[in-house]
Amino acid sequence: MGFRIEQVRLHQIEMPLVHFFETSFGRTYGRKMILVEVVSGGVSGWGEVTCGEHPFYNEEWTEGAWLLLKDYIVPAAIGKTLESAADAGRLSAGMRGHRMARGGFEAACWDLEARLKGVQLWKLIGGGARKGIPCGVSIGIQDSVEQLLGKIRTEVEAGYQRIKMKIKPGWDVEVIRAVRKEFPSILLMADANSAYTLNDIDHLKRLDEFGLMMIEQPLAHDEIIDHAQLQAALQTPICLDECIRTAHHAEQAIRMRACRIINIKLGRVGGFAEAKKVHDVCQANGIPVWAGGMLESGVGRAHNIAMATLPNFTLPGDISASRRYWKRDVIDPWVVVTPRGAIVVPDEPGFGYHLDLEFLQSVRVRQETLQAQ
Ligand code: OSB
Ligand code: MG
């Protein structure tokens, strides 16, 4: 059963974060995100473009993604019939990069196909390996070490299974030492978002004493070879985030021994088809994966939950409760986390949650509809 892409609606929404989020590349107080609604036979599938407001995590940003979707991605797709959502990525394959914009559209097609068939998205993508998703949290750089310790305590008490803290030069060894002193046995990891270079090898080796689960993307966003050199010098496993945009990158990184773990972000790799390929390459090579996050609304969160039911997502991901980010989420019910730090995989068709359309309208700042002839 194929489906025709009859209408696409782009919705840009803006929502303040409950608490600012700071990484090595900057501080975010609120999110501007694009939701992609693909309509066929009166049924809507939803996707989220996960890029930031500025081109600092990667080259994409909300304003650029809006133009790319409106002028290229949607025009290339409108009126086309797809045998399955697995073919959706091909409609924009001639466009270089911009995987988050293309992935937001691709993910909407998967949700649409699942809803048209009345099956759960996790089933459609070949997941279902687990009924509960193990959850971790990502905690940004804070104004003080005391503030960080307080945040970690709150999340550990809420049941989250692992803590990730953001680091950068000047907020690393001594801060982690303070965290370890207070929380000697928690599963702890650090994410540098490319804040270091190979000149920092000796400095980064000092992190080995803290028993971190992994250090995420210490070096440049596009530098696999330098990570191989660093991994050879470190005991702590390296996890690549920014570097892995395709299954081929994963293959290269694994072959070079540039990492021992990979974080898969649905948007960064351009949607479910590529995410599954990255997952499979890692699985075949004994490299565990986990689901990364991009401060998503409920729509992106729901997609991440489906993705994390694939078998090799064995480590706790950056998928946490809606209320950690938003006063109110755009889906109903909100994503909640059990006292044991897990998300129960929803059983409803599609990505498993309803859109809160009334709230969506109240946070929407622009909309564009493209209609097939
Ligand atoms: O590197 O994982 C990252 C947020 C924005 C940009 C990059 C990253 C992050 C996170 C947040 O760590 C994860 C989340 O959504 O909670
Ligand atoms: Mg990261």
Image: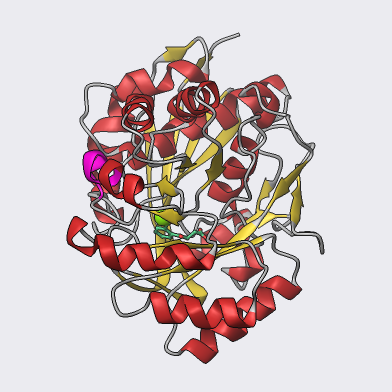
Q: Residue furthest left?
A: 199
Which residue appears at 81% of the width and 60% of the height? 340
**Residue 152 versus residue 18: which sits nearer the camera?**
152
Q: Is residue 178 magenta?
A: no
Q: Determine the residue positioned at 67% across, 33% down.
A: 350
Of residues 205 and 317, the one nearer the viewer is 205
Q: Can see residue 78?
A: no
**Where residue 230 sits: x, y (%)?**
29, 50
* Quadrant (top left, top right, bottom left, bottom right) of the N terminus: top right
> How far across and down, in percent of the image, does residue 31 sit?
42, 65
Magenta part of the chain = 221-227
Give the answer, above or below, for where 54 lies relative to 254: below
Taking 234 as reference, is 270 above or below it? above
In the rendered view, does 327 fall on the left or right side of 59? Answer: right
Asked if 338 appears above or below 246 in the picture, the reply is below
Residue 118 found in image quarter: top right
Ligand 2's quadrant is bottom left
Instruction: Say whether residue 200 is left or right of residue 372.
Output: left
Q: Quadrant of residue 103?
A: top left
Q: Is residue 154 left or right of residue 70?
A: right
